[in-house]
Image (spheres, rainbow, N blue to C red):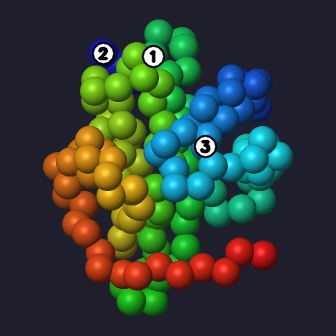
Amino acid sequence: MKIEIVEFRKENKEILLQMMKEFYQSEALEHHLSNQTITKILDDILSKKYNAKGYEFVLNEKIVGFGIVTFYYQTEISGMTLQFEDIFVREEFRNQGVAKDYIRFVMNNNKEISRFRLEVVEDNLVAVKLYEKLGFEKLNYHQMVIDK
């Protein structure tokens, strides 16, 4: 199975929006997102105004998933960090190496990055196992936020 990984394309906005709703309102997230927020995420990525990229996972000309990454400078490593924000693969295409191929693609095409980072809900054991297999290690940070 050969997955093609391409940046989000405006002509695929509706299918991407449908998949994003499926993901952002699933158990993979601690808090579900509103349709308005999901639409804004997609519009923001397509606008290319932010340090964010979206990728489509394409198999036989069909989009089977997506991934979103962001980029930022991190002082503790004095370099750029690429954050894997979201990774979604449609259920019928899971456990076929799609997410693994995507992560490797991103890492191989961003050699200037000093750290690759992601977050995962702890009880998503399948994802945790995959990320550990790819070399990710647990960070013992207690994250805190203020949403505005």
Q: Which residue is mark 2?
A: 1
**From mark 3 to mark 1, how far is it between C-alphas?**
22 Å
Give the residue displayed 28% in from the left and 23% down from the top: 96
- The one nearer the camera, 46 or 14, is 14
Disc 2 or 3, which lies upstream in sequence? 2
Look at the numbered disc 3 and give the secondary structure of its residue: helix
From this viewpoint, which residue is outermost toward the top?
60
Horizontal arrangement in the rendering, residue 16 relative to residue 98 (left or right): right
Q: Position of residue 74 (x, y in %)?
A: 47, 82
Look at the numbered disc 2 and give the secondary structure of its residue: loop
Question: Is 24 drawn above or below residue 146 in the view shown?
Answer: above
Kindly check if marks 3 and 1 are in contact, taking CB atoms under 8 A apart as contact.
no
Question: Is 12 drawn above or below residue 143 in the view shown?
Answer: above
Look at the numbered disc 1 and give the secondary structure of its residue: strand
Q: Which residue is mark 3?
A: 24
Q: Could you classify mark 1 by the number of other residues whose Cα lies within 10 Å: few (under 14), some (14-19), or many (20 or more)?
A: some
Disc 3 or 1, which lies upstream in sequence? 3
Residue 43 is at least partly visible in this image:
no
Q: Quadrant of the C terminus?
A: bottom right
**From mark 1 to mark 2, how far is it between C-alphas?**
8 Å
Q: Position of residue 41 (x, y in %)?
A: 73, 50
Q: Amino acid at mark 2?
A: Met
